[in-house]
Image (tube, rainbow, N blue to C red):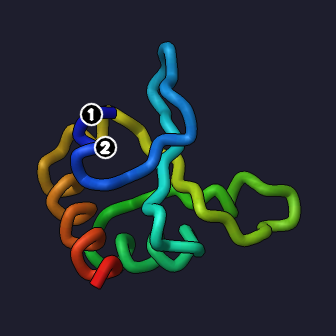
Amino acid sequence: MRTFERIGLELFTEPLDGMFLWARFPHIDDSLALAEEAQRDGIMLAPETAFRPHLERSLWLRFNVAVCADTRVQRWLQRQRRIKAA
């Protein structure tokens, strides 16, 4: 969680336990587009769109915290923050 906050991601809520958390970049309004970019770079992200009954657009991504401990994922997220915020 602290790494995500340092990167600039907004947490939906601070989870008490579990392996998933929901977060978003404040300046990105479509998590599906971000997930598609990640996939092209070999990183799998889960946009909330995949969890909605009619696949509505969403701001949020669901992260597996174990996978996000990978520094490659963290560096990718940092790069996206810089690119998208510019």
The residues tagged by marks 1 and 2 sit, at their Cα atoms, a distance apart of 5 Å
> Label 2 sits on what residue type?
Glu
Residue 4 lies, with reference to residue 24, above or below; the image says: above
- Asked which secondary structure carries label 1, the reply is helix
* Residue that numbered label 2 is attached to: 5
Q: Where residue 2 sits in the image (x, y, percent)?
A: 27, 34
Q: Where residue 26 sits in the image (x, y, percent)?
A: 47, 63
Residue 45 in the figure: left or right of residue 73: right
- Cβ atoms under marks 1 and 2 closer than 8 Å: yes
Total numbered labels placed on residues in the image: 2
Q: Residues within 10 Å of mark 2 (few under 14, many from 20)?
A: few
Q: For the view shown, which residue lies furthest in the bottom direction? A: 86
Q: For the view shown, which residue lies furthest in the right direction? A: 54
Q: Where residue 17 sits in the image (x, y, percent)?
A: 48, 15
- Residue 2, disc: 1
Q: Where residue 57 sits in the image (x, y, percent)?
A: 71, 71
